[in-house]
Image: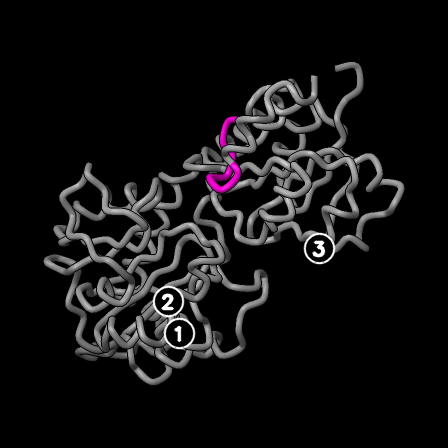
């Protein structure tokens, strides 16, 4: 193409990522928030692609404000705040990071399991406060260890499978809940989140966040998990009802939790700050150099294919049919 396509960023990407995009595309600017009023009209008129994340999203109103927009690329797996129906109406392709960061997110998931179940973060804070003056048995309650525990994975996709592979080394029994039962694993299958929570000791949230599973981890699931249970969320914040989680942790409905993701990032609920039985990290499960390289390469591949009139590499499943029909549209 004679003219370089123009893109807008909806997330603060690294210089390396921006440099890779700038090799072939004109970066018109950056949105501080997913608000159409934050994009100057002169800029909006030229934007053909939006590169953002699922936790930031893109509304119908934003798409309206970008009249030439033809593709939205989500950097990472999630796309929960992209208005897919609006994209379909406007014939806008939506892509995501698929399993590009799955191994790295799985590593972080294992770290969070250990941090909450073995009280690592709480012990670190105790030492830093100068409170380790003598050995106190059961200072953090009885710690049972992981061996022999029942480990439930909610969402056995690419990330869930990578987590399961790593957790098998801890000699845990693995069960899962998924949209459909998988034929390629012999893990125990459970039909819904409550049934999985009733069975397991540790509940790992590794599902794709969309409208169907918003707040799937609610008070009922937490109660089913029980007073020795731990919940870890590694994928998308809005899968967890944070008010219900705060109450469950405060009242010892469950023993502990670890979160790498939150419902309204970067905002974190005030009550979370005072909960000693909660471990928090700032959504950097996929923040390794290798993961960022793979996700950047996938965004570039999707953009390159789209603007060459070819099918994109990793369309979101809900719009896969539309992506397949788009071949040759921009030639």
Number of other residues with Cα within 10 Å of mark 3, as a class: few under 14, some 14 to 19, many 20 or more? some
Task: Identify the image's colour scheme: rainbow, by chain, secondary structure or one colour.
Answer: one colour
Helix, strand, or loop for circle 1?
helix
| Of pointers 1 and 3, the one earlier in the residue sequence | 3
Query: Could you tell me which residue is drawn at 42 percent across and 52 percent down?
Result: 235
Q: Nearer the viewer, residue 306 or 89?
A: 89
Residue 276 in which image quadrant: bottom left
Q: CA distance from mark 3 to mark 2?
A: 27 Å
Question: Cβ–Cβ below 8 Å for labels 2 and 1?
Answer: yes
Describe residue 221's horizontal placement relative to residue 77 as left or right. Answer: left
Q: Position of residue 192 (x, y in %)?
A: 27, 61
Residue 12's tag is none
The residue range painted magenta reads 313-319
- Residue matched to label 2: 217
Question: Is 139 situated left or right of 242 in this image?
Answer: left
Residue that badge 3 annotates = 33
Residue 114 against residue 106 in the figure, above or below? below
Whole-angstrom CA distance, mark 2 to mark 1, is 8 Å
Q: Which residue is mark 1?
A: 245
Report the mark closest to the observer, 3 or 2.
2
């Amino acid at each position: 193409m004679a003219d370089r396509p123009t893109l807008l960023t909806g997330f603060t990407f690294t210089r390396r990522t921006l440099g890779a995009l700038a090799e072939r595309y004109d970066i018109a600017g950056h949105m501080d928030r997913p608000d159409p009023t934050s994009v100057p009209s002169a800029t909006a008129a030229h934007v053909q692609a939006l590169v953002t994340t699922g936790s930031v999203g893109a509304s119908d109103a934003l798409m309206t404000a970008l009249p030439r927009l033809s593709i939205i690329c989500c950097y990472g797996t999630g796309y929960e705040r992209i208005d897919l129906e609006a994209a379909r109406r406007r014939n806008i392709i939506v892509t995501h990071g698929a399993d590009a960061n799955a191994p790295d997110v799985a590593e972080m998931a294992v770290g969070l399991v250990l941090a909450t179940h073995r009280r690592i973060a709480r012990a670190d804070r105790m030492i830093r406060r100068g409170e380790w003056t003598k050995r106190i048995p059961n200072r953090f309650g009885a710690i049972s260890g992981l061996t022999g525990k029942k480990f439930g994975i909610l969402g056995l996709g690419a990330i869930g499978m990578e987590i399961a592979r790593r957790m098998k080394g801890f000699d845990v029994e693995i069960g899962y809940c998924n949209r459909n039962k998988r034929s390629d694993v012999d893990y125990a299958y459970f039909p819904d989140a409550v049934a999985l929570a009733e069975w397991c000791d540790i509940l790992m949230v590794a599902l794709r966040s969309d409208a169907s599973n918003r707040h799937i981890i609610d008070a009922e699931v937490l109660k089913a998990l029980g007073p020795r249970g731990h919940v870890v969320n590694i994928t998308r914040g809005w899968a967890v009802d944070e008010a219900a989680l705060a109450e469950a942790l405060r009242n010892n409905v469950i023993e502990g939790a670890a979160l790498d993701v939150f419902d309204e990032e970067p905002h974190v609920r005030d009550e979370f700050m005072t909960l000693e039985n909660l471990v928090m990290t700032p959504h950097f499960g996929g923040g390794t150099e290798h993961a960022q390289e793979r996700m950047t390469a996938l965004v570039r591949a999707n953009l390159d294919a789209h603007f060459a009139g070819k099918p994109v590499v990793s369309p979101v499943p809900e719009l896969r049919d539309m992506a397949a029909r788009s071949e040759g549209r921009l030639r």
